[in-house]
Amino acid sequence: MVTVYSRHGCHLCEDAVKILEGLREELDFEIEIVYIDGDPALEKLYGEQVPVTHIDGEHHDFWRVDPIRFRSSLEKHRQRR
């Protein structure tokens, strides 16, 4: 599961999700979008770093999704399982 911590109206977040959706079928993963708006704990954790991406609960990256880096991280994560 790939989780994207996002804010409503965040263009970087929308771009990140589009990139992930483009990779989803090829790499076989699900995407969950969690909006941090109005959640004080998540806003404190991620604030202005959104989008923040996690792979199976582990922090991957923030601000942008680099397809090459994401693919590599996903493969490494799956090898550790």
Image: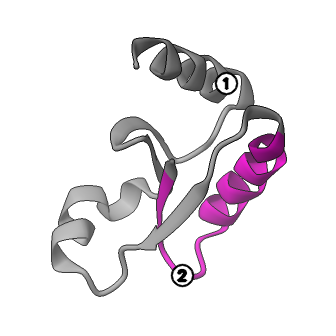
Going by the numbered disc 2, the residue's amino acid type is His
Q: Nearer the viewer, residue 56 or 48?
A: 56
Give the quadrant of the C terminus. top left
- 42 to the left or right of 27: left
Q: What element carries label 1?
A: helix
Q: Nearer the viewer, residue 21 or 11?
A: 21
Q: Is residue 9 above or below residue 20?
A: below
Image location (x, y in percent) of residue 78: 51, 21
Distance of mark 1 from mark 2, alpha carbons?
26 Å
Q: Residues within 10 Å of mark 1 (few under 14, many from 20)?
A: some
Q: Mark 2 points at which residue?
A: 8
Q: In this view, does 62 lie above or below 72?
A: below
The majority secondary structure of the magenta stretch comes to helix
Q: Name the residue under label 1.
A: 71
Q: Which residue is drawn at 58% across and 71% down?
A: 10
Going by the numbered disc 1, the residue's amino acid type is Arg
Camera-nearest label, 1 or 2: 1
Q: Is mark 2 on a helix, strand or loop?
A: loop
Q: What residue occupies the far front of the structure in this picture?
A: 81
Q: Residue at x 25, y 67 (%)?
A: 42
Please say whether residue 10 is one of the residues in the magenta stretch. yes
Image location (x, y in percent) of residue 32: 53, 62
| Color scheme of the displayed model | one colour
Q: Nearer the viewer, residue 12 or 35?
A: 35
Image location (x, y in percent) of residue 18: 77, 57
Over which residues does the magenta segment extend?
3-25
Image location (x, y in percent) of residue 79: 49, 12
**Mark 1 or 2 closer to N-term?**
2
Q: Residue at x 57, y 26 (%)?
A: 74
